[in-house]
Image: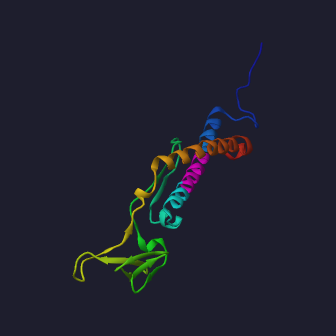
Amino acid sequence: MLEFDTRPNDGIRTLAETDKAMRLATNRATNRGLRFARKILVRALSARSGFPQKAIKGRRRSIIQRAVGSNMFGMVWQGTNAIPAGYLGKARQTKAGAKVRSKLYPGDFVVTFKSGHRGIMYRTGNSSLPIKERTEEIDHLVSRSAIKRMVDSRMNDWLDQELSYEFDVKPGRSI
């Protein structure tokens, strides 16, 4: 008569522990991949638009929904709304108007807000009020399909690399 011991040994994990370990390893790899995708996305938008990466990524323009628990999926969202011109660099007042980096806004003026932020404003009518903050559009400067293709091509290779790292190099870290 043959007997089998179904209790886990010290070196062997149970099926539930292995499943949990795989889920956690996949979540870690996915979350690292999402951060990597955001980095690629911000760099691509910055290169195509000429705006600094800090202006594109900052002020809640880039959001990552992480993979947590049994949800092994995540999402990167990048906003492409207009960016206030004051965030594109140091705003300077000149005789001709306001200037940020090498771009001149004729007739505009620099305002320092209570928070310390320096913005570029312009008058909407002939009187002194109302005024609006000058913005730069980013949406028309980028091709969404080209950036999506670039991110997708890099992400597949990178995610394979991260998953193999999690399962081969760091298998004991999972629990």
Q: Residue at x 47, y 46 (%)?
A: 145
Q: What is the quadrant of residue 18 in the picture?
A: top right
> Is residue 30 visible from the viewing direction of this image?
yes
Q: Residue furthest bottom?
A: 95
In the displayed structure image, the side of residue 163 where residue 142 appears, left or right: left
Vertical position of residue 1 compared to residue 139: above or below: above
In the displayed structure image, the side of residue 12 where residue 146 appears, left or right: left
Vertical position of residue 13 compared to residue 129: above or below: above
> In the picture, which quadrant includes the N terminus?
top right
Q: Residue at x 55, y 44 (%)?
A: 152
Q: Residue at x 56, y 56 (%)?
A: 39
Total marks in image: 0
In the displayed structure image, the side of residue 3 where residue 100 appears, left or right: left
Q: Tell whether position 123 is magenta.
A: no
- The boundaries of the magenta stretch are 27-40
Q: Residue at x 48, y 63 (%)?
A: 56
> Is residue 117 visible from the viewing direction of this image?
no
The overriding secondary structure of the stretch rendered in magenta is: helix
